[in-house]
Image: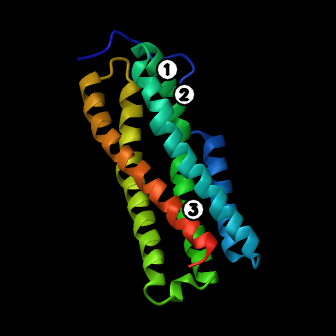
Amino acid sequence: MATSATTLPAGAPPLVNIPYLAGALAVIGIMAWSVTAPSLWFLDFVHVFSGLLWTGIDLFMGFVVGPVLRRMDPAARRQAIMQLMPRMLYLMPTLAISTGTSGWFLAQRLGFTGLAFPQYAWVLAALTIITVLTVQGLGILLPTNLRVYLEIRKARPEVERIGHWMRRYVRFVAFQGLLQIVIVVIMAHFATGL
């Protein structure tokens, strides 16, 4: 079943957006610099800031923006998604990559990767969660966002198809939110000493 909309929303940003791509590459460049720079503080800052943004945006999208979008008029929801989705397609994978990569190198520099059990169990838990978050984010959520965005850009998007994708998406986002909270607990444990 198609919506009544027959034209693309005005001002829909293109999927390939040079400023968004440049911003994502700049963040990856800063992360790479932090990994190779001698400053432990800078590496820690990049890891914490990327993780804070990733977790905060994930939880905000899941618990605030998602429920608001579900209650919006379909035409308004389509317009909001058209503006939001291209940004998220660049932002979230960039933050996930930056957080996980800088976190791994930070753990190495701080000696966490060489700990013995039972302390290493905390490191293993963090590695497992970040792996699950990243695989789900890049392998499930990102492709779903891309499919929804491409479908919603059509003059007559298939609403049932979008609904099917979004029901699956919501389950994964809820699980991501739970894992994000657990990883914050683990990181707080690291910050206070193992």
* Residue occupying the point 41% across, 47% down: 142
* Residue occupying the point 28% across, 29% down: 163
Q: CA distance from mark 1 to mark 3?
A: 30 Å
Residue type at the position of mark 1? Gln
For label 1, the residue is 79
Contact (Cβ within 8 Å) of mark 2 with mark 1: yes
* Closer to the eye: label 1 or 3: 3
Instruction: Point out the image quarter for the C terminus.
Output: bottom right
Q: Position of residue 146 (x, y in %)?
A: 41, 40
Q: CA distance from mark 2 to mark 1?
A: 6 Å
For label 3, the residue is 99
* Residue occupying the point 57% across, 20% down: 11
Q: Position of residue 13 (x, y in %)?
A: 56, 29
The answer to whether residue 5 is above or below residue 67 is above
Q: Residue furthest top?
A: 4
Counting the numbered discs, the total is 3
Q: Nearer the viewer, residue 56 or 23?
A: 56
For label 2, the residue is 83
Q: Alpha-carbon neighbours of circle 2 within 10 Å: few (<14), some, or many (≥20)?
A: some
Residue type at the position of mark 2? Gln
* Closer to the eye: label 2 or 3: 3
Nearest to N terminus: mark 2 or mark 3: 2
